[in-house]
Image (cartoon, rainbow, N blue to C red):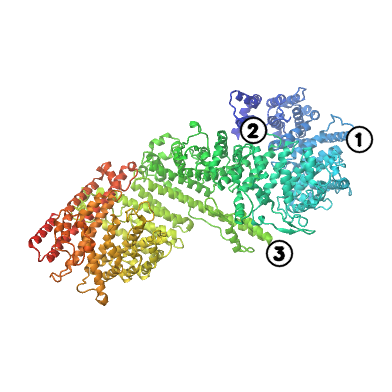
Amino acid sequence: MSLTTNFTNELVNNGLVDKILFLLLEFLPDKEIEKLAKQRAIGGFKHRHQVMELLKEIRSSLADCLFSLACQSPFNKSNSMALINFMKKNACLNAEGILDDVSITLLTTFMYCANVSDSAGQSDMLKSLPCIADTSYIADIQQLLLSDDAWVVHGVKSVFQFVWAVMLRNIAQHYDSQSLQEHIEADEMLIDLALEGNVFKFLLETINKKKNFHESEFRIRRFHTLVTDFIVQMPLKIKELRNRGDEAARILFAHAQEGLEPPVNLPRHFEHFMRLISVLYSKDDLNLELAVEYWCPSEQSLSPSRSSYATSYRHRPSNRQVSLFKFIRMAGDLLPPSLYVPYIAMLSGLATGPLCAHHCFNLLKVNGLSGGGSVTSVSWDHFFQSLSRYYSNLRQETGAHHVGGQRQILGRGITPQELDGLVTVLKLIQTVAEWDEEARIGLCENQAWLPIVLLFGIITCSVPPLLKAECLKALSTFAKTPELAANLWQALENSQILPTLDIGSSGRSGIPLDLEIVESRNEEFPMTIGFLEFMSCLVQIPIPNTLGAGLRAPGFDPYLEFLRDQVFLKFHTRAYRDTKEKWEVASRCLQIFHKLLFDHNASIEDFMDHILDIQGGGQTVANKPAGHHLMVQMFKDTHLLKLILYIIHEACEVFDQYKTFPGSVHLESAALYCLKMIDIAIEKQAEFFGLVRSQSLGAMVTPMDQLLMSINPKTGKADHLVDIAKFVSHATAYPEHALIAVKVLFSVVKTSNIQSQIVGLFSVNEVVGKELIIGFVDCLETDEPEEEEGELALQDIENQDIVNIRNATRLVILRLLLFSLGQPAPNLAHFFLGFDVRKPISKSSLQDPGVLGSPRTCLHAILSILEKGTGKGSGLISIHTMPKLAEHCYQMVYQLCSNSETSISIMRYLGMTHNFFYRHLKHVPFVNRIGQNTNEKLLLNQQAWLLKSVAVEIRLTSVNRQRSYTQRLLKLLLEDVPSTVVDRDDNDDEVYGETNQSIMETTSGQQVGPNILGIQVRRRILQILDSIDLTQTYPGNVQLDLLEPSVTEQLIKACEQQMDNGMTLCNIHALHRELIGRLNAQQGPAIVGNRPRILQEIQEILKNVVECNQSKEMAGAKRHALDAWRQVVEILFASCSQDLLPLDIRETILLDLIQELLTKVTDDATVPELTAPVSGILITLMTNLLQCVVVDQSKAIPEQLSTQYVHMLDGSVIHGSGTSFGGSGVISAAVLTEILRKFLTFLVQSSAGQLRVRSNLYGALMNFLQMPKKVHEIPTLKGRNVLDSCMLSEYEKMTTASLVVINEFGDSFMELVCRDACDGHDVGRMLALSLMDCILSTDKQNRWLHFLNSKGYLRHIIESLVQEDQSLQDMLRPTPEPLRALYIYESKMSLLTRIGETTNGAEVLLQQGIMGRLSECQFLELRPERDITRRGDGAGDIVKSDAFIPTVLHRYRQLLFPVLKLCIAIMTSLGGQHKEATNQILRFVFSHSELFTAILRDHPSHISVEAFQELSLTTAVICRTAADVDYYGGSPYDAIGQSQLVIQGHLSRIQRQILALVPRYCIHDHWNKRLKLASENEIKEEDKEKIRLSLLEVNSNIIAYCRSEVSSTGSTGQSCNVLFTPSLSEALTRNYHQVTEIPMASLSATKPPSLGLIVRHLQQVANTFLPSFDSHQQLVHKLSNISELSAEELKEFIKPVLTDRIEKLSTSYRQQVACEQIAQMICMKAKELALKYCILIKLKRYSLYFLFKILIKTNTNIRKQIQDNINHKCLRY
């Protein structure tokens, strides 16, 4: 405080006052404008207006500086005299002849300099005032004021003299100083001088004509002090003025009696003084209630409701208050006629305010009871008695002369003086009734006064329109009480001042006649305006349904027709003496229409005609609601709508000119109501049109958006929407108009798809387009903080301050842009955000304002809002000061980034120009700091939109290989040590030079700076997760005693509606309306007696619903924030390569995230609604963690092939790590065990109805269980394969530990998984089955198998195969249903196959009859002969890669392959000697013999992988079962009896079909040639390798079958089973073309295949073995030296996997992918060599055996030649 005082004192001492006065003298706005105009620096109307307003504001601010300084400390003598001299010479009058703003401010400044009232009674403070402390102060200034020098404005001198005189009198009363006695005695003289200058008249005109006079609190208080000091301190002067006033009244009366003109210079100071008091207190915009000081009532005069005020008067009133109240009583005693009106006007001014009005009412009421029954002229009794006499006389006169009396301007019984008195009295009644409801009711209920009857009666008489207008205005004040308004409706109907009855041929009368004849002729419309005001108050309550019932059709139609047709539609065609009245009439009409339209809710009853009976006979149609009539006319091209659009256009033109004129305020109001009516019509359009369409009504209506696109008659263009949008450009002066205009624009674009047309209208005129953009930008850039959290409703606009309106405008603008952004281009968002709408949006280039001529757009405004505080330590400002706006701004940024058309331009602009994401991400998470109390919901939503944008940024920058920028964002999110890069200021250019530092260098305790070592902090990504609380409290149920809870619940659900963000909330306003409506509809004494309690319960219900909505919104915000966090995390691990995010860091972060999430969701306080999304995040994280393990294993392959590693394993095995997944050892067994335990805990907790959550957790658990990998062998074929026992033991430990944790949860967990596998959602069933598959693969103790078998789940799964047979058959239709049944079937068969891979499992499956159930499945018989979905293309069974639904043949093989694999698994587990297994599988084969025959006989014209795989699996099943059956000797089917021959027939046919495959598939030359000739489009290279392997598998199966058949028979010729004919022509010939064309019909039991085929097959296998071996070794060499491969070699390996943008991949990633591909190729080559090896061994071991059996009697030389050939080939291998 002292510092500020010293600073200001120094400024004053340095001549501050003189400098300001000099600037005020030199700085004149007109001169400055003239200077700018000469330099051509002034633009159009708007720019000129803005510059002028700025100059005026500067000048006003200079004057305000002096005013503020004087309020704090009065000026010294020199400064005071400088001020007086300035006002003496430079006081200015404006165009209206009153002082301008600067002069009034300086005048008030002098009043504060001469103010000693505040120091009264405090001598020390009084002595410190300059006027007392400086002995020459009073003398010098008084001499200056008493001088005869001329002043520019003489009234200013009189005011100065009056102020000085009051100051002297105050000094004389409170300070005793003999030295000042001489000057103090001049106070009377100064007062007389001031009165001679008509000081009161000057002040009266100044205050009365100054519009904003009552807006300054300190100014009003100083004038109040001046007037009250004068009354209190100079009572004799007041009495003298009253006496002079009485004398002047007598003179005026005498002149009037004699018919003479009154004297011109007759002093009327007391009259002017009372009128000054009237205008000074007539307005109380600031609710200061200064007039209360004039009233000094007794406690008895106060009503009970004023008891709180009465307590303040228990002590004796102050002398000041007594003096002021005495002045009121004294001024009203024995009033002469000339002072009567000013006194009543003074009472009207002093009655402003609730308490003042009550006191005035009591004063006038008491005055009427004094004098022993007589009343004074200032009392309610006198007022209403006079009105009653006037009414009686006028009614008699009206009855005698009817309408003829109205031809006179005044009634014959009312003089102008009487009219003035009546108008003043009526205004007093209006003031008292306006401010005090008790007085309002008291006036109307007094049977002696009956004001309603008198006022309506006077209106029906022949009186001037002005008197009728005041009567109507008085009635409008009574209508503000609902109880009185109901009576007023009836009184209005009975009075017939507006005729509503069809009387006959008597013609028009009442108000319509006065409007057409009297007011139109006079060009003045006070009565119409009064009637409109009266109707406006009446429609605030519901219009009575029975209005006018009995005599006419009940309803509002007569009044609406008059208001619409006679008043509104003709207002612009009438002549007006005062332009103000023209727009006032329009404004008040539109106010009524708006209210009727707003209150109307469309219903089907509105379109129906209801016939009613009327008195006297006859029927009539009841009036429809007034709102319905208006609604119909709003949706047609009617005169009403045209006039509304005309007013909007006129207002736009006036606003664009920036000129004021009489009535401009009413024009603004009229334009506002026009906009509101259009907005309401659009808002209710959908419901209204829905009723019209649903009932097929005949109403011809047009949507509002089409009407607004019609041609404007004034301009000839379709520019109505342009006119509406222009109001946004005037938001500074007219904020309410801007808000409604934006709402209208928003509603139009939501209800129609005409955005491109609107953009064309806005951009056709470049000047208009720029103005609109500037207007929207100005609205967004207002700095007012948000004050209210709730939405601003349309009806609440008039009751809101400018700040809330501007905040609402900003929000609606952003919502408009957000909605438009999702519409086809070009749209309004593109236009206002600065995109070039004249070319493709994606090609737009965004620049900062001013760069390349770019204007400032809404995008720049949005960024400027968000950028506040980014470079400061205090954090972001907008997220706390304007949280809703910030939320929408962040949402806009995200929508722009995610939109395909705007993404490229906006991301380039934000990233490169503003560094937006990095600067904002530094402040995440958004939390409340000390002293901040922002709603957490808004902070979470802001954070969510920002994180979503960051996710898009990371994705794009990583894909485009912008390494440095991506690295900065990753470090900001993931580092766990303080970073000098991150902590620097955002504007530091050196930041970009240091971004090459890897995330690995600033993570896990690495040293970053010289003073930072090992200081770990929590990762920002984890801090963001910490800010999301997964707990949420919901309000409980309301205890209801009188209302029915079930009915209330139904009402709440009926009032629920979906918001724009997808959330369902209850509409509080609709619920309140429904509850109150039901309450009002119920009748009875019980309801009436319990009504207060019912209303209380309704309030409790509404409060509870509000809390529920808030809880839902909070939960939605948390879900939104969690989803945004999920997107960032997923993008981090999916898009960032290993050079950006190294593997060990990736694994560490994944583990941290998984553990943190599991810790949060396993908390007992969490709610399922918020934990459900976490399950989806966990499955993503676990998938990425599994990929890390897989990648790490693939990366370890080249290292493990090195000599340092191979010699430890004897050079045989290549494998991945055991438990130290990732190579860095970050994933320990303890960590994995704890994660698994939390997973299972979360899974068990979500068992109640959260199938989606469990499904996600099943997937996550599958990924978890797959992480411990067995040793992966990559055979180098250089020595004996030796496995690492240590690694195997680690794998066993991990799987065992996982099973132990799973078993800890007991049978409940198994029951849960099994139940989900058998029942529930299809996805959940598949995942549960897959999870059981994973667990069974490691369950060595068969605990799960035993549980499945004992509880019947396995039986249920097997039986379901038959139950779902029909569904599986439907899968083979050309256009199948969704493939869910197919996928579930595959999951079941995978599980059964896993069970069948163990001996116990296979036996259990056989015991449960698995093969029998498969034998019953008919879908296996539906094998298509060819793919019917690929007709004519010759592709047969090819599946197009771009088709989501596979072909029929592909779908069938998806069904067949699992069955064949199951059979192979059972036979492999139990062996060929297991007769039961062989028996059941053979029965299965025989039951589907047609299927197997079709597969074996199939000869596809097109080579495909699936066809060979099908044949391979089929031959494997047949060869492992049928070959071991001895059907020539003992048969396992002896018990069958007569069916033995049938079985032998099946086996014989199988043998023929197998042997028929020998010439087709046992010759490799033919197939190699076909594969070589096939193009890449026909067969891919990797598919060719698969085909070769499948071909070798078929060969191996055929050879194994032949070996079994030969070896199972005897050695004699009689028992020998001859398979091949003794011919070697195929082996010896060089042309094999004829050999491959052996027809199937030629193959029979009597003619087997030739032996030469087997020999030739042996030759081909032996010839291709060594080349395959060499190829294998080359691949092994490349794998071990992967780092030495060239870029082209790497490209060849990874091209089949990654076809696009290979050159953009990092070298390490390319090497990783190539390593995986080479490893797969090595495994395939190894498998190929193994198959060839098996074929050779089988042939070597068994070929001579059956050859010699066949060639026993053959030539010895041939036999020896064959034997030598076979031995040579085998020895070569």
Q: Earlier in the sequence, mark 2 or mark 3?
A: 2
Q: Residue furthest right?
A: 258
Write down the residue under mark 3.
1084
Residue contact between numbered discs 1 and 3, judged by CB atoms under 8 Å: no
Residue at 24%, 59% (x, y): give it: 1593
Residue occupying the point 64% across, 56% down: 604
Spot occupied by residue 673 in the image (x, y as percentages of width and height): 66, 44
User: Where does the image place residue 406, in percent across and percent down from the top left?
Assistant: 84, 42
Q: Is residue 1285 visible?
A: no
Residue type, numbered disc 3: Gly
Residue pointed to by mark 1: 257
- Cβ–Cβ under 8 Å for marks 2 and 3: no
Amino acid at circle 2: Gln
- Mark 2 highlights which residue? 657
Sooner in the amino-acid sequence: mark 1 or mark 2: 1
Q: In front: 204, or 1371?
A: 1371
Q: Is residue 380 left or right of residue 1025?
A: right
Q: CA distance from mark 2 to mark 3?
A: 62 Å
Q: Position of residue 669 (x, y in %)?
A: 67, 41
- Quadrant assignment, res 1458: bottom left
CA–CA distance between discs 1 and 2? 53 Å
Cα separation between marks 1 and 3: 67 Å
Front: mark 1 or 2: 2
Q: Is residue 1406 left or right of residue 933?
A: left
Q: Position of residue 1610 (x, y in %)?
A: 15, 70
**Secondary structure state at the residue bearing disc 2:** helix
Name the image quarter holding residue 1314.
Answer: bottom left
Judge the density around disc 2: few (<14), some (14-19), many (≥20) Cα neighbours within 10 Å. Answer: some
The numbered disc on residue 1072 is none
Tell me the amino acid under the disc marked 1. Answer: Gln
